Image: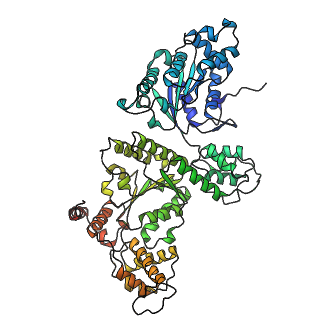
Amino acid sequence: MATPLDLPRATDLPAWLSTLRDRYLQTNTTQFVLYGNVHDAVFCAGREWNMPALLDAFFEPSGKLVVHYDPGRGIWFPNLAQTARAGRALVANGFLTAQKVLPRGDATSDGVVARAVNDELERERTPEIALEVVESLLRTPGLPVAAVIHYAELVAPDGSAAGLGFHDRTAGARLHRWSQADEIVRGDNLVLMLTSTLTELARRVTRNPRVGTLQVALPGALARARFLAHVQPGLTPERGAQLTRVTAGLKLQQIQDVLALHKASLPAAPSPAQDPDFDTQDTRAVFSQADPGPLPLEAIAARKKAILEQECYGLIEVLQPDHGFDAVGGMGPIKQTLQRIAGHVAAGRRAQVPMGILFVGPMGTGKSFLAEAFAKESGLAAVKLKNFRDKWVGSTEANLEKVLGVIEGLGEILVMIDEGDRSLGGGDSDGGVNSRVIARLKEFMSDPDHRGRIIFVMMTNRPDKLDTDMKRPGRFDMKIPFFSPQSAEERLAILRAVARRHKLPMDLPDELALAILEPLQGYAAADMEALALLAWDDLQSGVLPEGIEAAPEAITAPFLAQAVHDFMPTRETAMIHFMELLAVHEASNRRLLPERFRGLQVDALNRSLAAARAAIPPQG
């Protein structure tokens, strides 16, 4: 006879389930909200479980009656014996009649009782009646119950009382009352409410001090490794570790779907850098020494990108930068600083990696382009945070939680926020949504466990519009100022980098190019790109400079001079000057400032800022 599975004591029990077990046993908490990755598979005790089956097995040793309610499915119980047990309790409470459920009294078989209960309750999906059934069981003397409410946000949705229907309001009130009722709390009962997004569940529930909230995170590295060894037997330790890394951020079900597209195994490759989420040697020990063949990592990465972007409803863009620092002209001190940080990341020196980096400076100075190059150089996965705001009540907060959950699951990652002053600036004319979003984002950014694993890089030309507390050390430890190139040599370096990136042939000696670029003080990196592309377009279109009778095969000095003559840079010089002073004001390291700003004292800087602000023309 097989030994019964004692799941609560499994050595690989998920962290959230271990916490639930310990908190339930050691405190008076009898209601828990499980949020996050609650609809995924779980690999535990050597097998794969769906969430209902996992909870059924977890509660089985306790002898509790387990009842599930899903508004799309109705009420159900784990097996025939549990269904019959519930039926007898509901008859004893007067909720069901003995004539229907126990036609032969105590001699009625479990099968007959179970069929009668299913006939009565199976199709009951409306929350008000289903919750009455569950409450009747919870109040049964001497019957310990574990009630599991799936899609709890559909049963008791969040929202203002005026905007909710009567049944929505009463469902939230009923769940709140269960946490206060002595006969339920002291009856060895447990109520679990499952929701993907915590903010979509009624605040009457989530803010109740007698309700515990536990996040079901995306599977960590060790959990993925164990699952991969189970579904993809024969992986070598090195290949298993690499596949574990490339599947970061995916649910187990998604990993299984991706692998189903590729029947072979992983190709030989160098061992990845150590993931701080797990010990590499421990992960390799999960895998065998056999090797059934290659698996296309590029195809897996592409599929992962599509899955994550779909999972987040377009709220993030998964980046795959194709350029490093060699594609960035000039900016020597900034590239050296970022290269040093990339080295700390690669070596696992987490204490030396900033929590966040703020790129600040006028538009067109190359902030976004350099951020993508930094992602390439650091070897980190990269995502760009897109507009997660929504017009519906609660949707913005729910979108943010969804994004943060994916970011947490991805582990080692660079999170880019472009135009941060627009996406995260603003006041409270939105009913407090912005304040709540900023508060949650600040909380996430300052989590010390994220140092060296999750790096935020925000780009902005108006840091004065950002929340002051967000810019402090511990969130943005490093603030890097960006300016237009300060010399003809820097402008030429950018011009040549642009030519390499766009594959533009150039026959342009340094001495001729420097003479043309010397007068262009104040031209930004974007202006240098525009000049190169204009000169190339003239060459291809046959717009020849004066004195040139035949088009050459490459951009020459006359074509560059003609482009400089014809190109008209921005005329918003007052705004650019103001943005430059803001960049000086925000800079965290004097060595990153141009020479003309390094000696500027705080008082003088503040006076210059005030004068520059006053000189900006009013916006219509």
Q: Residue at x 63, y 31 (%)?
A: 54
Image coloring type: rainbow
Image quarter of the N terminus: top right
The answer to whether residue 411 shows anywhere in this view is no
Number of labels in the image equals: 0
Image vertical order of residue 539 relative to residue 70, above or below: below
Q: Is residue 64 above or below residue 409?
A: above
Left or right: 223 with respect to 134? right
Residue at coordinates 36% horizontally, 42% vertically from top-left? 433
The image shows residue 372 at horizontal and vertical percentages of 49, 62
Q: Position of residue 365 (x, y in %)?
A: 39, 68
Q: Residue furthest right?
A: 1
Return the residue nearer the eye: 316 or 28: 316
Give residue 315's position: percent from left, percent from top. 47, 50
Say which residue appears at 45% left-offset and 25% top-offset. 171
- Kindly indicate the quadrant of the structure image that contains residue 533: bottom left
Whether residue 195 appears in this view of the structure is: yes
Drawn side of residue 285 relative to residue 32, left or right: right
Instruction: Find residue 8 and report its image quarter.
Output: top right
Give residue 199's position: percent from left, percent from top: 44, 37
- Quadrant of the snapshot with the C terminus: bottom left
